[in-house]
Image (cartoon, rainbow, N blue to C red):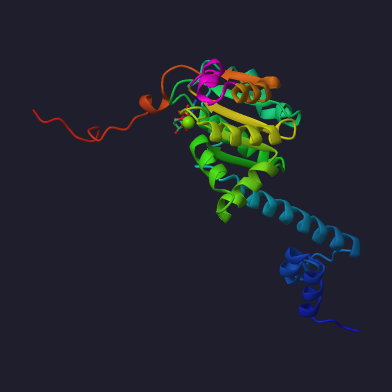
Amino acid sequence: MTHSIESLQKQFHQFRMSETSKALPNFLRKAEKHSWTYQEFLHEILTYEEKRREEKMIEKHLKWAKFPYQKSLDMFEMDGQPSLSSRQMNQLKELSWMEQSYNLILLGPPGVGKTHLAIGLGLETIYRGYRVSFISMGELISQLKTEEYIRKSQLQMKRIRQADLVIIDDIMYMAMDQQEGNLFFHLINHLYERSSVILTSNKGPEEWGELLGDQGIATAILDRLLHRSEVVHLNGDSYRMKNRKSVFQSETVQT
Ligand code: ADP
Ligand code: MG
C-alpha cells in the first residue's frame, strides 16, 4: 500500500509534529540519497522535531520577555566595568543564583551598564529554556493599576507572574503612593521564592523605604526583596558619556 507524501504530512500534523510535517519531503529525499536505515530515518526526524521545538520556544520566550533591546553578555566589555570581576561575571552567567530563586540587585549611577547586564542575563536565562519578563518600574506600576480593565495589561501581568525571572528596571526612581505600594507589595509577595527578580536602581536599598509610600508596606517589600539577594555595585564613568557621539565629530575645523 502506498501513501502520498501529502497524506503522511497531514498525519504528522495531526499528531502535532508540524515541523516534521513541513520538512518531510526533504527528509525522504535525503533518506533515499544516503540510504538511511529505518532507525536512522526515525532518529533524524525526531531530532529535527525536537530542535525546532526548542528554537520556537526560545523565539516565543524572547518575544514575551519584551526586552527594550537585545545586548548579550558577550557584548559587555569587562574593561569598561572594573567593579565587576571576570569571576563574578562567570558566576552570574552560570545562573545558579537564578535556579536557587535568589534575587539580584544591580546598583550604580546612570550609564554604567545596569540595564545591559540585566538584559544579558535575561537572554542567557531564556537560552536555558526559562521564561523571562522585562519591565521598567514606571510601566509596571501602570500595568498593575490598569490590569483590571485593560486586557493587554492583564496579559502582560500574567506573563510576569508566571516568569522564572522578572527584571524590574529603574526601581524606585519615583515615590509611590499607598495604593501603588500595595499593588507592588502583592506582586513581590507572589514572586517571592517562586521566581527570581533582577532589580536595577541608582539608589541603594536604604533609600527605597521612603519611596514606598507606607512604612509597613515598605518593610514588607524590602524584607522579601532582600531576603535572598545578591547585590552588585557597578560604578565608574557612564559608558554612555564615554562613547557619546557628537554631532560635531564629523565636522572639519576650518581655519
Ligand atoms: P544603566 O542602565 O546603568 O543606566 P545601560 O545599561 O543602559 O546603563 O548602559 C548605557 C549604554 O552603554 C548601553 O548602550 C550599554 O550597552 C552600554 N554599556 C554600558 N556598560 C557597558 C560595558 N561594560 N560594555 C559594553 N557596553 C556597555
Ligand atoms: Mg538603565
Residue under the image location 67 percent in, 21 percent down: 223
Horizontal arrangement in the rendering, residue 52 relative to residue 118 (left or right): right
Magenta-drawn stretch contains 227: no
Magenta-drawn stretch contains 213: yes
The image shows residue 49 at horizontal and vertical percentages of 77, 59
The image shows residue 33 at horizontal and vertical percentages of 78, 68
Residues 44 and 219: in front is 219
Q: Quadrant of residue 236?
A: top left
Looking at the image, which residue sits at the far bottom? 1
Looking at the image, which residue sits at the far left? 255
The image shows residue 156 at horizontal and vertical percentages of 60, 48
Residue bounds of the magenta highlight: 203-215
Residues 128 and 211: in front is 211
Horizontal arrangement in the rendering, residue 123 relative to residue 234 (left or right): right
Horizontal arrangement in the rendering, residue 104 relative to residue 69 (left or right): right
Location of residue 232 with respect to 53 vertically, above or below: above
The image shows residue 213 at horizontal and vertical percentages of 53, 26
Residue under the image location 87 percent in, 83 percent down: 2
Q: Quadrant of residue 180?
A: top right
